[in-house]
Amino acid sequence: MNDVLHKLPEFIGNHLALVALFFVLLLAIVVMEILALFRKYKELTPAGLTLLINRESPLMVDLSAYADFEKAHVPGSRHVSMSQFDPEQKDLAKAKDLPVVLIDKDGRNTGKAAQRLVKAGFSKVFTLGGGVLAWQQAQLPVAKGKN
């Protein structure tokens, strides 16, 4: 270990770009984790969503493309296309006090919708990390078709 510490300054001097890239990536990871701690919505794992379903019966909104929704979706979720997603819609506005879970195919596009819900006054907003793909990888049941 002592030998490694003696060679470290030489390594840093010979590989400045690599060391700089390492620190930029480290800083980016730290910033992303800090932002995740302070955002107003939570990301659930498939197991966490299962617990929420069993305990609180959340409203689950699937924002996937309609073709993806028909292929596979979390049972009990309702499809709303991302272009028609509106937190002020009267049916959705009735659920301000209920937990609302946003789901999509791979979990990449639910963050902006979750922020819109929080901004509209929803108090319990969640996203499914990894989306329906994570749900399937956890070997949980999926529904197919329109319902």
Image (cartoon, helix red, strand yellow):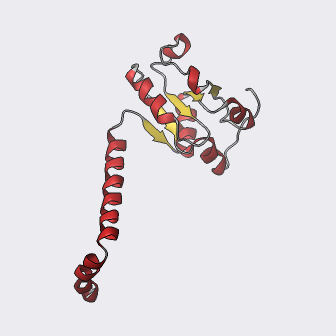
**Residue depicted at x 65% and y 36%:** 74
**In the image, residue 82 lies at what x, y percent?**
57, 27
Residue 106, quarter of picture:
top right
In this image, 72 relative to 111: left or right?
A: right
Q: Is residue 125 visible?
A: no
Q: Is residue 115 visible?
A: yes
**In the image, residue 30 lies at what x, y percent?**
32, 53
**Residue depicted at x 34% and y 53%:** 28
Quadrant of the frame with the C terminus: top right
In this view, 79 is above or below 26: above
Name of the residue lying farthest toward the right: 145
Q: How many marks?
A: 0
Quadrant of the frame with the N terminus: bottom left
In this image, 80 relative to 26: left or right?
A: right
Query: Front-most of 7 and 3?
Result: 7
**In the image, residue 52 lies at what x, y percent?**
53, 35
In this image, 29 relative to 137: left or right?
A: left
Residue 72, quarter of picture:
top right
**Residue depicted at x 58% and y 40%:** 50
Residue 4, quarter of picture:
bottom left
